[in-house]
């Protein structure tokens, strides 16, 4: 209360300085998503959709793949919307760290050749 009275005495204006100086956010599709895909047979999902496959399992009824997909690939294709295919995105996205790891991996592969 005393601080309020003091502020009024000196004609202090209340404002949110962060709002004035903050850079607005930019929306992008340039990120990777960790997903789990379930499908009936191996012909339904190509491994080319994935940047990296982390886990693969199959039995007589279903196949399951956990992997990393670039978000733009999901937007531009509809293979994951087909009947019999389920796609579940993990809550955490894989960001630039994945890009740098992938680039480092590629450089190491080239060095071995």
Image (cartoon, grey):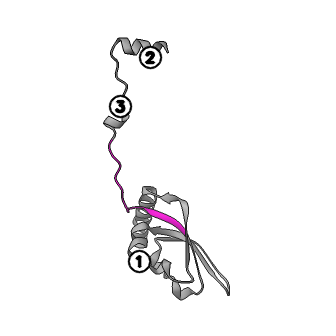
Q: Nearer the viewer, mark 3 or mark 1?
A: 3
Is 50 situated above or below 82? above
- Circle 1 Cα neighbour tier, 10 Å, few/some/many (<14 / 14–19 / ≥20): few
Reading the image, the residue beneath label 2 is 4
Whether residue 69 is in magenta: the answer is no
- Left or right: 9 as drawn, with respect to 62: left
Q: Residue at x 48, y 82 (%)?
A: 46
Look at the image and give the residue range highlighted in magenta.
23-35
Q: Please name the predominant secondary structure of the magenta segment in the image.
A: loop
Q: What is the x, y in percent for residue 83?
A: 54, 83
Q: Secondary structure at mark 3?
A: helix
The residue that mark 1 highlights is 77
| Residue 27 at x, y percent in the picture | 36, 56
Classify residue 85 as left or right of residue 61. Answer: left
Element class at badge 2: helix
Query: Distance from label 3 to label 1 (Cα)?
Result: 43 Å
Q: Is residue 38 above or below residue 103?
A: below
In-front residue for pair 17/11: 11
Q: Which residue is mark 3?
A: 17
Q: Residue at x 36, y 28 (%)?
A: 15
Q: In the drawing, does residue 55 fall left or right of residue 82?
A: right
The mark that comes first in sequence, 3 or 1, is: 3
Q: How many marks?
A: 3
Q: Label 1: state its secondary structure.
A: loop
Q: Earlier in the sequence, mark 1 or mark 2?
A: 2
Residue 68 versus residue 20 in the image, above or below: below
Q: CA distance from mark 3 to mark 2?
A: 18 Å
Asked whether the viewer can see residue 65, the reply is yes
């Amino acid at each position: 209360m005393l601080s309020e009275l003091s502020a009024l005495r000196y004609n202090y204006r209340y404002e949110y300085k962060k709002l004035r100086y903050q850079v607005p956010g930019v929306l992008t599709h340039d990120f990777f998503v960790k997903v789990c895909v379930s499908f009936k047979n191996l012909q339904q999902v190509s491994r080319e959709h994935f940047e990296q496959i982390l886990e693969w399992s199959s039995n007589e009824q279903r196949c399951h793949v956990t992997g990393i997909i670039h978000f733009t690939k999901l937007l531009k294709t509809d293979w994951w919307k087909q009947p019999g295919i389920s796609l579940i995105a993990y809550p955490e996205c894989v960001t630039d760290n994945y890009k740098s790891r992938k680039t480092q991996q590629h450089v190491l592969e080239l060095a071995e050749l």
